[in-house]
Amino acid sequence: MTDEKFSDLVTCYEKLVFTVCYQMVRDFGEAQNLTQETFLAAYRHIDDYQGDNYKPWLTRIAANKAKDYLKSAYVRRVQLDFDSTEERYIPLERSPDEIYVSKEGGEKIAGLIRALKEPYQKVSDLYFLKQKNTDEIAKILKRPKKTVQTQIYRAKIILQQLLKEGSIDEKRII
């Protein structure tokens, strides 16, 4: 295969390969690295491939690269040994947005969520404050899952706008 044809192959499948890698490792930077490694491995072995449909072949290479990364990442994981009473350390099991919400604006955001009008208030309360997933919320509120997803999406937009403005006018909240 010529370099030009391989370049076309990369252009055609780069998003697919990146998506496969990202879905497995959940790290944007590592997914980019694994995407490059996938195409490098494919380039090295392109002449050995017996077929004309490259999609499943590239997908399998990407999945294997991601699995290899996850195995090695598990081995490299560093366990921190620290005193939990020290506040300068942040627990590793919490995401940055959870840390921010809890330390900086948890009460403000909770107040904003509780001030939203229906249908956004109940959905937001269950999703953001009670950490329920969309399936659970749909069951609790007896609404279709797609409706719940749409309401969460719209509530996020409303909350982002309110946080950007920095003002809370409860009469104005949709």
Image (spheres, rainbow, N blue to C red):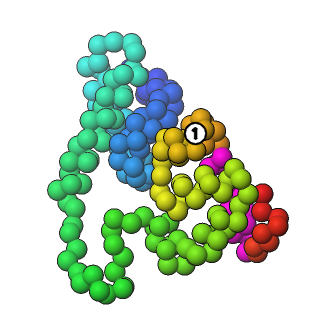
Please say whether residue 164 is visible from this viewpoint.
yes
Query: For this rendering, which residue is in front, 96 or 127?
Result: 127
Q: Main secondary structure of the magenta part?
A: helix
Q: Residue, x 22% and y 62% (percent of image)?
A: 77
How many numbered tags mark residues here?
Answer: 1
Location of the N terminus (image quadrant): top left
Picture coordinates of residue 169, whole percent (x, y): 79, 71
Query: For this rendering, which residue is in front, 168 or 23?
Result: 168
129 versus 54 height, above or below: below
Location of the C terminus (image quadrant): bottom right
Picture coordinates of residue 14, whole percent (x, y): 47, 34
Query: For this rendering, which residue is in front, 174 or 161?
Result: 174
Picture coordinates of residue 166, whole percent (x, y): 73, 74
Q: Residue, x 40% and y 15% (percent of image)?
A: 53
151 versus 76 height, above or below: above
107 versus 44 height, above or below: below
Horizontal arrangement in the rendering, residue 170 relative to residue 16 (left or right): right
- Residue type, mark 1 in image: Lys
Q: Which residue is mark 1?
A: 142
Residue at the left extreme?
75
11 versus 141 height, above or below: above
Please say whether residue 7 is visible from this viewpoint.
no
Horizontal arrangement in the rendering, residue 79 relative to residue 56 (left or right): left
Residue 48 among those drawn in magenta: no
Picture coordinates of residue 147, whole percent (x, y): 64, 39
Residue 159 among those drawn in magenta: yes
- Quarter of the image where one finds residue 157: bottom right
**Where does the magenta region start and end?**
151-166
For numbered disc 1, what is the local secondary structure?
A: loop
Q: Residues within 10 Å of mark 1 (few under 14, many from 20)?
A: few
Q: Residue, x 52% and y 62% (percent of image)?
A: 129
Residue at the right extreme?
172
